[in-house]
Amino acid sequence: MRVKIVEGVHLNVVPSKQFKTTHVNIQFLAPLRRETIGARTLLTSLLETSSADYPSQNLLSAQLEKMYGASFGIGVSRSGRVHRVGASINVLDDNFTESPLLPEAFAFLRRVLFRPLIKDGSFDAATFARERDNLAIYLNSMNDDRGTQAGLRVQQTYFDDPAQAVPSFGTAADLGNLTAQSLVDTYTDMLQNDQIEIIVMGNVDADHVADLTRELNFAPRADLNVSIPYDQAVHGGIRLFQESEDVKQSKLNLAYHVQTDSFGPRYYAAELAAQLFGGSPLSLLFRNVREKQSMAYYANASTNLNRHIMMVQTGIDAVNRARVEELIGEQLAMVANGKFTDGQLEAVRTGMLSDRRAALDSMQYLSDMALTAALFPNRVVTPERELELITAATRAEVQQAAAGMQLQAVYFLKGETK
Amino acid sequence: MLKTEDYSQSGEVVQTDVLDNGLHVQYVYKPDYHKTYAMFTTNFGSIDNSFRLAGDEEFTRVPAGTAHFLEHKLFDKEDYDAFDLFGKTGASANAFTSATQTSYLFSTTDHVAENVDILLSFVQDPYFTDATVEKEKGIIGQEIQMYQDDADWQLYSGILGNLYPTHPLHVDVAGSIDSIATITPDMLKTVHAAFYQPRNMTLTVVGNFDVDAIHNVVQANQAKHDFSQLRELERGVQPDYAADSILPYRMQTLPISRSKAIVGVKGLTEIPDNRDGLRQTFAVRLLLEMIFGDSGAKYLDLYDQGVIDESFFYEFTTGRGFNYITLGGDSADPAQLSETLINVLTDYKDSPDFTPARFEVLKRAAVGKFFASLNSLENIANQLASQSFSSVSPFLIPEVVEGLTFADVQNAAEMLVRSEAISVFHIHAEEEQ
């Protein structure tokens, strides 16, 4: 249930008695722009570690401990053309505490989000410098995990638009131009202009939650005027990016363009095609590339259909590169050409349905669904609708979806032992 | 007959039974949930590198990585793959091996009975051939290589090597390319017969299912198997609480951007597998929270000085025959990090954060976090399964933690924080050429 609190600010309540905690998630939505990604990411680090009422990280953590060990975090992510900053807190349900924690959770979020550690138009200089340095170190060390490195590089190779090509949390180079003053502008812009979606889930009363939300006193603002999906035009030829490192296992990652709609029949047909191709232990990649041919320790596919892409990630021996690439192409062609049994398709479908039903036990999934529904107000996005469309997708539609997947970019991290 | 244990404080009820063949079963019915999660666990892990059955004179030694290899191989049958059987019903299956246990699991929203039957049967009916065993060596070889590229894994492995150099805990769960090369189908059969006896195993089912009906399925399934020839198992691996074997320091270099340090503290005293042991374990965890937790003055001091960052971690691990503390993180100067952490730990009595008042707040937070963790069926099942060979239920954690006193934490610190038990491992980032 989505209700308007003021213009541009909506509350989405998901009542449930299933869990022992209550989840509150405040999402700030802005158009994705290359130049603000790094600033918004650093802003989350500052808000997460300091505020006027909790000027240092240990005081902020101590407050959460007093609330029976509540968990809290702020982070960024990307949904197609939208950049999101999300602040969330989970507190115990009243059954397990002496006094209700939900009002305290809202009060905590209000202090952290509305009373940052800003004085005379600047964030605290020491906090700013430390968080900027820590974030730079963290971003510079991302590639120490080779799987992450390969995933980020293939995305960089695929996308032309720099805002899509970089990670959703930006790069270390972004941080150099930021100052304790400039981040105040980033903060003010986010607080005043971003579309706000608030999701509250748990054993709650909708009216009570609406009252608590109004007390946050968000000013009215315009709704986001951006269509979320990002669809890069298909180009001829395949882009290749290769590098070598002193590692034992090589990584071969591929990125495909996917034709799809938003949460309609084509969306779920594409999801099914990707699952059959490489999404589960029943998939062709797992079966044929990993198990039958022993050509990879892992080989799987995942989609981001808001960005019209499918990624394949594998860990292999460098000498097998050409053979693995050929095998991957063959598996996708098999899906497109219908070279799979009805039994295989039905097993993958049953698995997807089962996974979606199982996800009803996850607060994260239910909260994400509520957010997605809010982001696509003109679409029906519910767990039930997902099950319906997965069930309805035909063999022909799955084949057609696979046939429309076009390889656009290949990244190879070649392991070379020194 | 199912026995009911009601843990009212946790809001959970467990039904248990021990079958005639010795298999221990435990069920938690969760009617508000959609899925069911089942886990079949054997008390056999990577440290179990030798054994003897009643009547044997000699111990049989097994190569490093055998438990993990066996875990992979059990899915593979003569004319089918167990993944397929689960998959046909929409269930998803998985398995994992730790130092002391191997677990096989599925989760599903439908056909629970059928999947329980598949789970029990595929784990208890082994099928190995030369060809499939050889092929698996390639797959696991890749897995081993991947871990060799993982700096955090190497760091952890490095400190275990320092603390337990003469104990199999220092060997990676997957073994090495050389050790698994010697594995044969016969070896796997022998090991399976020894360690996969029902009395060495537990079945844990958590979720939305009919407990009585599933219990009947389990009993019927087990009645089909003949376990009459089984012999008593004796493990060769011994506990390791010795200080004299500890290597105080080692380091290695890797092609990464940021160096890493880890400090290990080897437990020199056994922590029993009962309620008292659970008390001691949580006393140690609270000790670490008090002096290293991010709500402390010391944490802030170290964070502001740049000695620690978000990568900082601390952990207390207990298992069959061992227990140890690990703490560390990333740092441009790993020696400074490890020295500082050792000083804070050994001077815990002088820490501004080591106070009875802070202890009370952290105790309440620990109980709150435990309740929150019960949102997840996986978490409930994992906790129940990993505790299933001990005599105390994880659902007693809130009661045990609430009963802890500051004196308990002081005692735990006295027991564990000893200079002769401390070791350091560094990974230096390779200089860019």
Image: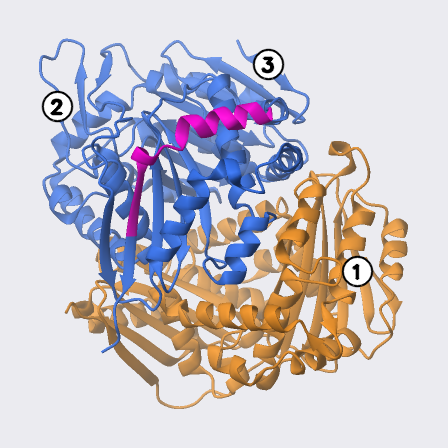
**Magenta highlight: main SS:** helix
| Quadrant hosting residue A83 | bottom right
Q: Mark 1 points at which residue?
A: A110
Give whichever of B15, B409 is nearer the camera: B409
**Residues in magenta, as a range:** B405-425
Is A100 in front, or is A308? A100
Q: Name the residue under label 3.
A: B4
Q: Is mark 1 on a helix, strand or loop?
A: helix
Does label 2 lie on the same chain as label 1?
no
Which residue lies at the image location 41% right of the left edge and 68% below the top edge? A142
At 70% across and 48% down in the image, what residue appears?
A63
x 35%, y 28%: residue: B121
Number of numbered discs: 3
Query: How far apart are the two marked residues, 1 and 2, measured between alpha carbons?
Result: 64 Å
Answer few, some or many: residues within 10 Å of disc 1's Cα (few below 14, many 20 plus, some between 14 and 19): some
Instruction: Give the numbered dot on residue B60.
Output: 2
**Chain ID for label 3?**
B
For badge 1, the amino acid type reads: Arg
Percent position (x, y) of residue B418?
36, 32
- Membership of B234 in magenta stretch: no
Q: In this view, does A309 lie to the left or right of A214?
A: left
Q: Position of residue B193 (x, y in %)?
A: 22, 22
Residue type marked 3: Thr
Who's orange, chain-wise? A
- Which chain is indicated by disc 2? B
Q: Nearer the viewer, residue B153 or A240?
A: B153
Instruction: For chain B, give the colour.
Output: blue
